[in-house]
Image (cartoon, helix red, strand yellow):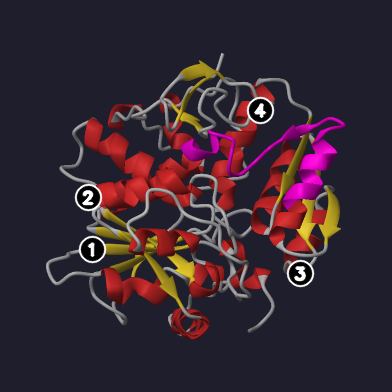
Amino acid sequence: MLTVRCARCHQTAAYDPHQWHCGTCGGPWEPLRPLPFDHHAIRPHRPGIWRYADLWPLPGEPLTLGEGWTPLIPLPHVDGRLWAKLDYLTPTGSYKDRGTATGLAALCALGVREVMDNSSGNAGASLAAYAARAGLRATLFVPAHASPAKKAQIRRMGAHLIEVSGPRQAATQAMEEALQTGGIYASHVYNPFILLGLAAAAWEIWEQLGRAPDAILVPLGHGMLFLGLYLGFEALLAAGYIERPPRLYGVQAAACAPLARAFAAGQKDPEPVPEGETIAEGVRIAAPPRGREILAAVRATGGALLAVSEEEIRAAQDQLARTGLFVEPTGALAMAAWKQALRPEDRAAVVMLTGSGLKSPPV
């Protein structure tokens, strides 16, 4: 049995993949917290994130394509204290692979054989790849305006791709209608076990850097990587490996920034915003379901939620390219805001580079 808890009322329950959220308060499910951590349980000979598998409740063999343990490199030509976590160097070219591996492993353990999801591209491509690896049938509902490269990736891996015209929310609605006839929502937002693979990014940074950084900047759409990092450093703190977690900074495109607006206004919950046009298509999320949890996490770490312009995103993408790092516009968001986050006393800050530049058309 896989046990989860509600992120809001903290009620625990046996995980049922048909039930996306808590039946009592409507809050999203998450793993039991704090996650356990013990460095003696690390198995370096295992691939990627699965070096931490003995700390997780997932039964069976790892579902893996080699995701995780991505390079952490310094950026001395930008700032001597700045480091980049190259999470675009993953099997499908985006950080999503971390969470897909653990989230789908949990569903496989429960006997699921057919999955659905809605995605702007990266999560869909990741699910298509890992479903193929696991021998599952996958159907992806994708906005018609999504990157052609990402849509081609989904098709080539055997998933059924359904393009939906209109805003991203239209793809979500189409998927919800299809779920009425069968299938499991393998959501990269609602599946709580996705957070295990994402929390591993925090543990990798701690191992690779030899300490917790002072700050981490993360592109922010649904905010799952942000929350995964929060849970990972929370576990290190609870186990006594660090004295305090790094300040977490979530970075949104100003054209669609509900969380940055809510943070600036001191709100507990974000309010939906129009889906403005942005080259950072991966964060074009008007109403993130875990918004309350993200706002609480950023305030707990002393960080901030920031919004950057299209010009700043392009400039950050160009700056990274000139250091040899080719990322898509969404993947450059963290780089666009590092000057706002770094403090004079900081010794190390990490920018999360989340998606390959090969996955988006030139801008």
Going from the N terminus, do you reach mark 2 or mark 4 first?
4
- Foreground mark, 3 or 1, reads 3
Going from the N terminus, do you reach mark 1 or mark 2 first?
2
Q: Amino acid at mark 3?
A: His
Please tell me in which quadrant of the rendered image residue 40 appears: top left
Q: Amino acid at mark 1?
A: Ala
- Element under disc 3: loop
Going from the N terminus, do you reach mark 4 or mark 3 first?
4
The label shown at residue 244 is none
The label shown at residue 145 is 3
Judging by the rendered image, the residue that carries numbered circle 2 is: 211
Identify whether 218 is placed above or below 75: above
- Element under disc 1: loop
Residues at discs 1 and 2 in contact (Cβ within 8 Å): yes
Disc 3 to disc 2, C-alpha distance? 41 Å
Residues at discs 1 and 4 in contact (Cβ within 8 Å): no
Disc 1 to disc 4, C-alpha distance? 37 Å
> Is 176 in front, or is 345?
176
Please tell me in which quadrant of the rendered image residue 287 appears: bottom right
Residues rendered magenta in the picture: 172-196
- Foreground mark, 4 or 3, reads 3
* Outermost residue toward the top in this view: 1
> Is 276 in front, or is 354?
276
- Residue 202 can be seen in this image: no
* Residue 184 is a magenta residue: yes
Disc 2 to disc 4, C-alpha distance? 34 Å
- Which residue is drawn at the image coordinates 33% and 29% (left, top)? 34
- Element under disc 4: helix
- Which residue is drawn at the image coordinates 49% and 79% (left, top)? 313
Q: Amino acid at mark 4?
A: Leu
Dot 4 alpha-carbon crowd within 10 angstroms: few under 14, some 14 to 19, many 20 or more: many
